[in-house]
Amino acid sequence: MSDFSEIEKAAVYRAIAARRDVRSHFIDTAVSDETLMRILAAGHRAPSVGLSQPWRFIIIRSDTTRKAVHASFVRENERAAAAYADERAAQYRALRLQGILTAPINICVVSDETPPHGHGLGRRTMPQTARYSTVCAIQNMWLAARVEGLGIGWVSILDPEIVRTTLQIPAHCEIVAYLCLGYTSGFAEHPDLEEAGWEQRMPLESVVAYESYKPV
């Protein structure tokens, strides 16, 4: 039996359904340190293999730092656009894919690939589970931000080596996500990429299999 009320359960499922990858709706409202720490604490509550807690959060507010990362985005975005042709290329260029300069806070989330905690439990045959654990932390942060009225955008169109150098990230840490965090003018009813016609969500039954793999 669940020890959550029906109202509490509904709130969790609502937050999951209402979460959005926010890129173009950030507003110029400061995020308090208390709110930021609640979101980071939610990330720190994520499950991790062997209780290794491999996530590391780098908070970025400096305009100089953000401009350096944004310059990498501009370069990589042009390269990505060149990979498409005709209507898809035009559609790609119309997408808003980052909020690096408009969001008040950027967060780079990295995974310590040799975490001192956990004593290696669960990672001997699948060492990549440290990164998977870090992704769980990101999802927790995303949901916490949503219920706080804040948007998060995940920017992956970046040169990781530029980010590594700019943020002085050591070699034993893997860059997992570069996030833009801030208050937003509103949350779309549907994900931006669905609204733009780039892609649609597949029905659940198409990705569920029983006893053996089923190709989509």
Image (cartoon, rainbow, N blue to C red):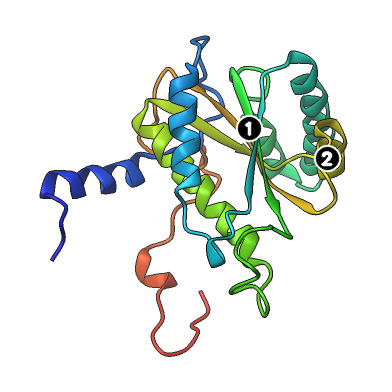
The x and y percentages for residue 53 are 57, 54
Alpha-carbon span between mark 2 and mark 1: 13 Å
Kindly state the secondary structure of the residue where label 1 is placed.
Answer: strand
Residue that appears at 62% across and 33% down: 95
Residue 46, above or below 216: above
**Residue beneath label 1, please?**
107
Position of residue 57 measured from the top left corner of the image (x, y, whole percent)? 63, 38
In this rendered view, identify the residue nearer to me: 51 or 108.
51
Q: Is residue 134 left or right of residue 110?
A: left
Q: Residue at x 61, y 29 (%)?
A: 96
Q: Amino acid at mark 1?
A: Ile
> What type is the residue that disc 2 sits on?
Arg
- Image x and y of residue 129, in percent: 61, 66
> Mark 1 Cα within 10 Å, few/some/many (few <14, many 20+)?
some
Q: Which mark is residue 164?
A: 2
> Is residue 187 in view?
yes
Q: From what the image shows, is residue 104 above or below residue 201?
A: above
- Residue 125 sits above or below residue 136 on the image: below
Q: Is residue 191 visible?
A: no
Residue 202 is situated, as x and y percent measured from the top left of the image, at 43, 60
Q: Out of 107 and 22, give the one closest to the viewer.
A: 107
Crowding at mark 2 (Cα within 10 Å: few <14, some 14-19, many 20+): some
